[in-house]
Amino acid sequence: MHIGISTLMIQGGQTGVGQYLFALLRGLHRRGSEHQFTLFVLEGDLALFDFAEGSMTVVPVSERHRAAVKNILWHQRCLPGLVQRLGLDLLHVPSYRRLLSRHPCKLVATIHDLAPFLVPKKYDWKRMFYGRVVVRWLARRQDRIIAVSENTARDIVRFFGLPQHKIAVVHNGIEHERFFPGSPGQARAWMAQRHAVSCPFFLYIARLEHPGKNHVRLIEAFNQFKDSIRSNWQLVLGGADWHGAPAIHAAIKASPYRDDIRALGFVADNDLPEMYRAAGVMVYPSLYEGFGMPPLEAMACGCPVISSTRGSLGEVVGHAAAVVDPEDVHDMARQLQRFATNPPARDHFQAAGLAHARGFDWTRTAAQTLKVYEHAARNYGEMALKHGPAF
């Protein structure tokens, strides 16, 4: 089978979708396959896919299609013709905003979350309309939908009205060759040299998005924590500015402990494991996640985790993290104090997290994704008749 995968939505690798795609492709690369793969890649992102050289064909796409609207239009107007000219049997689009309306071959999509339905004011009204109305129609034209969690699968049934049998739940994995405990001392020395952070610190890895990622409440909780006890613990935020980032920067500036709050900006993928190893605690108070990779990655590196259970996070972290109500600032502050002053609690959740993280692996995710492709291929004739001709 000749399988095409669009990568035009990765935004330079600085998003969760980008990290999902890189890890999935590396898992497919390691696993080997009798199938042929073709990747559609924006010219400016070509270097990010060097790891696929020799095992996958890369088709460059002009940079003029990078902007969001032009990117969506390229998927609708240009990609179907490319698919037909290349003779693809199946196309995988790993982002719901780029789903095809035409049906040039078997279509598989990954839906990571349905945040527009669940997080008020997450995007402007145009994006909210597209996510709630247009994508609902596009999703019905796909042969198979991959949901990254049971929670997301339930949301797809609830909000899109798709039948359960059309959805396959394939959990994300962890690249255990990258995310492992290592040396905490060495990691702390690296953190001090690289980012001038030498005190123990709470870490939150998420793009600076307000209100969805809940940074402002975390900063308020950190302020309460610092008020309550004399502590040298710091708060480190790793993530690029996104929608609503000015509100987060304003909260940092207004904090009486602003000197102990560090916003590092985008954290390179290669730096993440060492940062997790250096952290005293990972705090993940997001208001909604379709999956939530950072808590699992932190666990795999031996970092204890405090997490919200909103969206799929309860499903993902299980009993291996201390849970917190993300809308209760006092609850968050209590958990920060508990972990900063109670080494046995940190040790307990470190051990629980390491054991839990072993259950997630990208090679298994890649194998399950291939099964989804094969299922879509077997059922293509029936689906094509159901969809009717492309337009």
Image: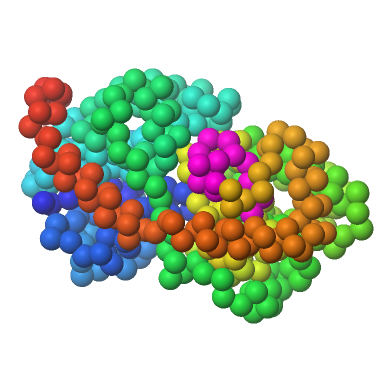
What's the magenta region? 304-318
- What residue is at 42 percent from the left and 40 percent from the top? 149
Q: Give the camera-side residue of 323 and 20.
A: 323
Q: Give the camera-side residue of 40 and 199.
A: 199
Q: Give the camera-side residue of 165 and 221.
A: 165
Q: Is residue 381 above or below residue 302?
A: above
* Residue 268 % position (x, y): 52, 63
* Residue 11 % position (x, y): 43, 50
* Number of disc labels: 0
- What residue is at 38 percent from the left and 28 percent from the top? 156
* Residue 140 visible in the snapshot: yes
Is residue 313 shown in magenta?
yes
Is residue 328 shown in magenta?
no
* Residue 12 visible in the snapshot: no
- Side of 118 where 175 appears, left or right: left
- Side of 114 where 184 appears, left or right: right
Image quadrant holding the C terminus, namely top left
* Residue 150 % position (x, y): 42, 37
- What residue is at 55 percent from the left and 62 percent from the top? 354
- What residue is at 42 percent from the left and 63 percent from the top? 175
The answer to which quarter of the image holds residue 152 is top left
The way the protein has been coloured in the rendering is rainbow
* Residue 110 % position (x, y): 33, 41
Q: Is residue 142 above or below residue 261?
A: above
